[in-house]
Amino acid sequence: MKKHKGFSLIEIMIAFVIMSIALTIVIRVFATGQRVVAETENYTIAVQIAESLMARVGEDISLDQSQLEGEVENKYDWQVNIEPLFINYKSFIDDQSNANLQLKKINVQVGWDDGNNTARVELNAIKQQIRL
């Protein structure tokens, strides 16, 4: 009896099933990686916008304002809230020369919608305002 060399049809079918399962897993991992990269990019841009706005408060943005809003690149909406922070200075300082010192609480929020859900980055700081 003569033996044939090669693979049977069932062996080829099993190899295709195994290969398609492995390929499906690789595609899912790649798609998840792409989504994570896009989310990370959005967070990075939002943090940069928030840090830029926080740095502008007291320089370009007056500490006398209470709320500002805007949008960057038609994607990232931002909001800056400035409010007085009241503490009892007399318990900390005896000198009346610092009576014109006022602290301001600054809250910067940057949000965006990526199609599936919304996300927001928030920064808080305290800055001093000296009234002359």
Image: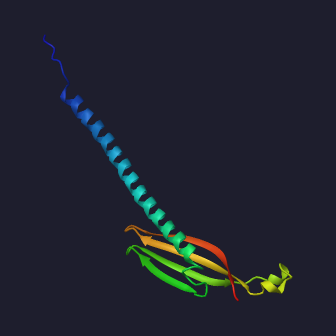
* Residue 15 in the figure: left or right of residue 101: left
Query: Residue farthest to the right?
Result: 94
What colouring does the structure picture have?
A: rainbow
* Viewer-side residue, 31 vs 107: 107
Measured as percent of width and height from the top left, residue 8 is found at: 19, 26
**Screen quadrant of the N terminus:** top left
Measured as percent of width and height from the top left, residue 56 is found at: 55, 76
Measured as percent of width and height from the top left, residue 124 is found at: 61, 73
* Residue 46 in the figure: left or right of residue 57: left
* Viewer-side residue, 40 vs 22: 40
Reply above or below: 30 against 101. above
Task: Tell me the residue at 55%/71% (across/down).
Answer: 122
Task: Tell me the residue at 58%/87% (across/down).
Answer: 66
**Screen quadrant of the C terminus:** bottom right
Task: Tell me the residue at 39%/67% (across/down).
Answer: 116
Query: Residue farthest to the top?
Result: 1
* Residue 45 in the figure: left or right of residue 26: right
Measured as percent of width and height from the top left, residue 33 is found at: 40, 52
Task: Tell me the residue at 28%/37% (across/down).
Answer: 19
Q: Find residue 89 and report its image quarter.
A: bottom right
Query: Residue farthest to the front?
Result: 132
* Residue 107 in the figure: left or right of residue 130: left
Query: Residue farthest to the left?
Result: 2
* Viewer-side residue, 86 vs 61: 61
Q: Find residue 6 and report its image quarter.
A: top left
Q: Find residue 80 and report its image quarter.
A: bottom right
Q: How many marks?
A: 0
